Amino acid sequence: MINRQKILEKLKNQINDHHHLLGVALGSGLTAKYAEEGGADFLLALNSGKYRQLGRGSIAGFLAFEDCNGLVMNFGTREIMPLIKNIPLIFGLNATDPMINLETYIEYIQSKGFDGINNYPSIGLIDGQFREALEEEGMTFETEVKAIQIAHDRNMFTVAFVFNEKQALDMAKVGADVICAHLGFTSGGSLGVKKVLSLERAKQEIQKIFDACDTVSPDIIKVIYGGPVKTPLDVQYMYNNTSANGYIGGSAIERIPLESSIKDITKAFKTSGTVQEDDLMIKMLDGIN
């Protein structure tokens, strides 16, 4: 495990040096290995990341296909930990799982070598009658806040997904190290959601959340995730127009680039030998022979 204070010191040094932070939400060792080599600052093992690797959309992480926490524990310890070298690994914890004792399970997460937790899947992404029914059963966002507090008290690094100002305040008050304004599932690609906020509207919502954080802890690390923010240009727009210190990419890093690159290289191999080679290429191949 990496000491929480060391993680915070490294992240805040980057912010003080006017660099932006990058977290990668993932579901495979392959992504973890190359995200670290590419300069990511921390990794989040989320069940939706594994579903993306299985060719499903991130929303699959909210359905009862598999034990969420067991899935993350399995691929996190078996696939990711053996490959990464010196980067924090955060456990995506389904805090509202009625089959676990929060304190005991968070202690277990820590004992397995994870450096911190994140509240995902989050009830904050659910609304309407289903949200009401979940809350009537005791599955509330307050439980996720409690999980972050327990992890903080155990000196674990914590990344809190929030969806409005009140949630941001609650998470900041219990000591979350990073507040992430979550804008919903990422658009783009064949598996992305189709209805999302505009960048302009997202900018406004983000800043409301960050302003709320600042009333409790002005130095808290503030990052963004999802929704319409899916390219480096989108992220730059948010940096220019909000007080965001960084960005967490899931589908934007792990899924969307892969979709296009696999299709493109497959087409290229399929058409090789059927296109007219240019003179230089013919001469090069002849020279090899």
Image: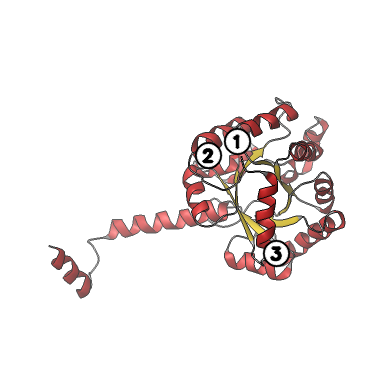
- Image spot of residue 40 (x, y percent): 57, 55
Left of 101 or right of it: where is 193? left
Q: Is residue 107 above or below residue 268?
A: above
What residue sits right under mark 1 in the picture? 113
Alpha carbons under labels 1 and 2: distance apart: 8 Å
- Comparing 179 with 58, the one in front is 179
Q: Name which quarter of the figure residue 20 lies in.
A: bottom right
Exactly how many numbered labels are in the figure?
3
In terms of sequence position, does the residue under pointer 1 or pointer 2 come before the other?
2
Residue extending farthest right: 215
Type of the residue with mark 1? Gly
In terms of sequence position, does the residue under pointer 3 or pointer 2 come before the other?
3
Type of the residue with mark 2? Met
Left of 30 or right of it: where is 103? right
- Image spot of residue 89 (x, y percent): 60, 43
Q: Is residue 274 above or below residue 96?
A: below
Q: Name which quarter of the figure residue 11 lies in.
A: bottom right
Neighbour tally class for label 1: few under 14, some 14-19, many 20 plus, Cα within 10 Å: some
Left of 186 or right of it: where is 167? right
In terms of sequence position, does the residue under pointer 1 or pointer 3 come before the other?
3
- Image spot of residue 143 (x, y percent): 79, 36
Type of the residue with mark 3? Asn
Say which of marks 3 and 2 sits in front.
Answer: 3
On residue 162, the disc is: none
What residue sits right under mark 3 in the picture? 16
What SS does tag 1 mark?
loop
Asked if the residues shown at circle 1 and circle 3 are in contact, with their CB atoms under 8 angstroms apart, the answer is no
| Quarter occupied by the C terminus | bottom left
Neighbour tally class for label 3: few under 14, some 14-19, many 20 plus, Cα within 10 Å: few
What residue sits right under mark 2 in the picture? 81
